[in-house]
Amino acid sequence: MNIMLVGQKSFAVAVFDALFKDGHEFAAIWTPRDDRLEDRAVEQEIPVVRSAAEAAIFMDARPAPIVDVIINAHGHDKIPVGVRNRARYGAIGYHPSLLPRHRGRDAIQWTIEMRDSIAGGTVYQLADGWDDGAIIKQDWCHVSPLWDASALWREVLFGMGVELLRRVLREAAWGPEYWPTTPGEKQDGRFATYEPLFDAARA
């Protein structure tokens, strides 16, 4: 797979390292300036983009599709449909909750605040809404009552996200019939929740 990786910080770096080890290639890295992910791009001489506008220019300057799939790994920039559609298989992302529950940026914090006993992670197709695209693959875990949000992320959901993304790309390599080119399992809106940023809600 030839990937455009969108992300930042330690999770994006872990995803890059895992997928690079698995033999995937990277067409471009979309990350903030001076992020650790940029260091990986410089080391491997991979083009870097900083915004949706730069990503669109990068795509337009090359024969389509130069990118097989866009992966969002802890990236907060909105990936517009025009960019998503230029990738052969569209765009996917990892969300640290069992979607459709806990849509929003502070999913892990709200998992702890609401005393959920079960948590999980979801790889899903990026769409125009917030965390509402079709589900591709999920995994779950019990939540220890001793954990705060940082511990839940560190102990389980971080590694779960890396492995889920690896599994999706590994299965896609088996053949086109394994790749979700059509919508996966549509999220059931009856069970959807969306929480605001946790600090704003507490304030």
Image (cartoon, rainbow, N blue to C red):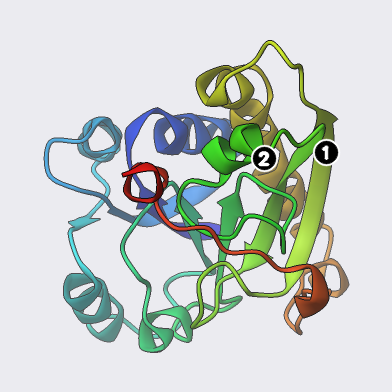
Residue furthest out toward the front: 203
At label 1, counting other C-alpha atoms closer than 10 Å, the crowd grade (few under 14, some 14-19, many 20 or more) is some
Which residue is label 2 attached to?
A: 114
Looking at the rendered structure, the kind of residue marked 1 is Trp
What separation in Å lies between label 1 and label 2 (alpha carbons)? 17 Å
Quarter holding the N terminus?
Answer: bottom right
Foreground mark, 1 or 2, reads: 2
Taking depth in this image into account, of 31 and 192 the one nearest to the observer is 192
- For residue 190, the mark is none
Q: Sequence-wise, which precedes: disc 1 or disc 2?
A: 2
User: In the image, 84: left or right of 141?
Assistant: left
Q: Residue 17, image x and y in percent? A: 48, 30
Query: In the structure shown, which secondary structural element does the residue marked by tag 2 occupy?
Result: loop
Quarter holding the C terminus?
Answer: top left
> Would you place residue 83 above or below residue 75 in this image?
below
Residue furthest out toward the right: 177
Residue furthest out toward the top: 146
Residue sitting at 37 percent across and 52 percent down? Answer: 75
Which residue is label 1 attached to?
A: 140
Q: Is residue 10 visible?
A: yes
Residue sitting at 40 percent across and 50 percent down? Answer: 201
Q: Residue 51, image x and y in percent? A: 20, 66
Residue 68 sits in quarter: bottom right
> Would you place residue 3 above or below residue 24 in this image?
below
Looking at the rendered structure, the kind of residue marked 2 is Met
Residue 190 sits in quarter: bottom right
> Would you place residue 16 above or below residue 106 in this image?
above
Q: Residue 8, image x and y in percent? A: 33, 41
Q: Residue 115, image x and y in percent? A: 72, 33
User: In the image, 52: left or right of 113?
Assistant: left
Taking depth in this image into account, of 51 and 98 the one nearest to the observer is 98
Residue furthest out toward the left: 33
